[in-house]
Amino acid sequence: MKIELFPSMMCADHGRFADEIAALESAGADGFHIDIMDGRFVPNHAMSLGDLGYFAKTARVPLDMHFMIERPGAYIDPFLAPLRPGDRVFIHAESDPQCAAVLQRIASRGLIPGIALNPGTSVESARELLKIAENVLVMTVNPGRAGQKYLTYVDEKISSLLALKDRYGFGLELDGAISADVIKRHAPAGVKGFVLGTSLLFGKNEPYGRIIARARELCRG
């Protein structure tokens, strides 16, 4: 199983997106993780519709979209429009009373539907959605801002999902304070993807290629 590494572009230099895209693609990034926040579902704002359009037009690798917004069914259509077939779209399981219908709408556009689970959201509360989602994004921090510490109690949820992934046919991705130690522990266990932010990738004064190469070595256990 190939482990996928997704730089979190919320942590990139927003004044140099073209350079950041080129450098990260050359370094071997498997895709770009794009956070969309509304300031209500989480207490922050992140990438804009304009940013998303630029990434969809410029990036050669897939986009890994993460919507942290209330009632995404009412608001995400303009954000889905620029996406390419095969791009991933995550919505939070607790964000919309019609979450299943929103996932089906995402899939109908040729996009890959996924659900995101906050640290306080149980697997059981989202079990029916596992039948629709092709990927599950586990938040290992409380979402909304970078630079937080990894919440170790989420490891129990990760183990529960790993036990279910073959039955339901989804891939598992982790997002939040992803360090070398987190990758070393969870990649051999069956986690398929990791979102890389300030804990491992950005602001290290080291070439992205060298960091991503080390991360891939960790994935091999």
Image: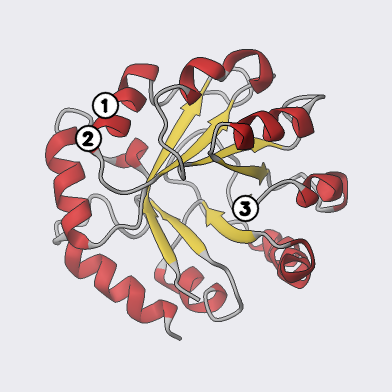
Query: Which residue is depicted at the point 21% across and 52% down?
Result: 24
**Viewer can see residue 39:** no
Question: Label 2 neighbourhood size at 10 Å, few (<14), some (14-19), many (20+)?
Answer: few
- In the rendered structure, the answer to whether residue 210 lies left or right of residue 42 reads left
Query: Which residue is depicted at the point 14% across and 33% down?
Result: 16
Q: Position of residue 14 (x, y in %)?
A: 23, 30
User: Compared with residue 216, is residue 199 higher up or lower down, i.e. above or below?
Assistant: above
> Mark 1 = which residue?
54
Residue 102: image quadrant is: top right
**Viewer can see residue 99:** yes
Mark 3 and mark 2: span between their CA atoms?
Answer: 24 Å
> Mark 3 = which residue?
135
> Mark 2 = which residue?
58
Q: Secondary structure at mark 3?
A: strand
Q: Circles 3 and 2: CB distance less than 8 Å?
A: no
Q: Amino acid at mark 1?
A: Tyr
Q: Position of residue 7 (x, y in %)?
A: 34, 50
Query: Which residue is depicted at the point 52% across and 37% down?
Result: 66
Query: Which residue is depicted at the point 20% across and 43% down?
Result: 21
Q: Position of residue 36 (x, y in %)?
A: 48, 27
Residue 9 or 26: which is nearer the viewer?
Answer: 26
Q: Secondary structure at mark 2?
A: helix
Q: Circles 1 and 2: CB distance less than 8 Å?
A: yes
Q: Earlier in the sequence, mark 3 or mark 1?
A: 1
